[in-house]
Amino acid sequence: MVKGIEQLAGEKRCTPAQLALAWLLARGDDIVPIAGTKRRSYLEQNVGAVEVKLTASDLSRLNEVAPRGATAGARYPEGAMQRVNI
């Protein structure tokens, strides 16, 4: 999945993070992605996602590379989940 995303990002001349944010922006005007970051340089890079234009073909490819539910599962391993919200 990661290789497919990296490949499409390379073709679009953007970072994988910018591609992900552009995908969210393409989902509708009621979606506002809020990307967390520690560094101003990453924030500035993320803002570049608004310049990434995704075609219907790009969106179709993304759906093939990362289909809905492909990343479903627990956020942490089971042992770590037991310590969440203790």
Image (cartoon, rainbow, N blue to C red):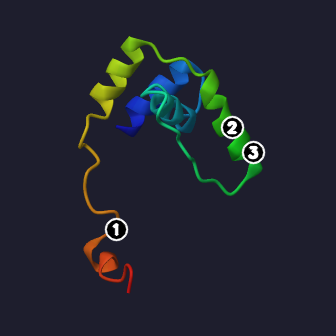
Quadrant occupied by the N terminus = top left
Amino acid type for the residue under numbered disc 3: Ser
Q: Are marks 3 and 1 in contact (CB under 8 Å)?
A: no
Numbered badge on residue 45? 2
Amino acid type for the residue under numbered disc 2: Gln
Q: Which x, y percent locates residue 55?
A: 44, 13
Query: Residue 58 lies in what quarter of the image?
Result: top left
Q: Which x, y percent locates residue 86?
A: 38, 87
The residue depicted at 50 percent of the width and 30 percent of the height is 25
Q: Which x, y percent locates residue 29?
A: 49, 28
In this rendering, is residue 78 above or below 74? below
Q: Mark 1: few, some, or many residues within 10 Å (few <14, many ≥20)?
A: few
Tell me if 35 is positioned left or right of 1 in this view: right
The residue depicted at 28 percent of the width and 26 percent of the height is 64
Q: Which x, y percent locates residue 56?
A: 38, 13
Tell me if 68 is positioned left or right of 16 in this view: left
Tell me if 47 is positioned left or right of 35 in this view: right
- Give the structural element (helix, strand or loop) at label 2: helix
Image mark count: 3
Amino acid type for the residue under numbered disc 1: Tyr
Alpha-carbon span between mark 3 and mark 1: 28 Å
Query: Residue 81 lies in what quarter of the image?
Result: bottom left
- Please name the residue that numbered disc 3 is placed on: 41
Alpha-carbon span between mark 3 and mark 2: 6 Å
In this rendering, is residue 7 above or below 74? above
**Could you tell which of marks 3 and 1 lies nearer the N-terminus?**
3
- Give the structural element (helix, strand or loop) at label 1: loop
- Please name the residue that numbered disc 1 is placed on: 76
Residue 24 vs residue 67, the one in the foreground: 24
Residue 35 vs residue 28, the one in the foreground: 28
Q: Are marks 3 and 2 in contact (CB under 8 Å)?
A: yes
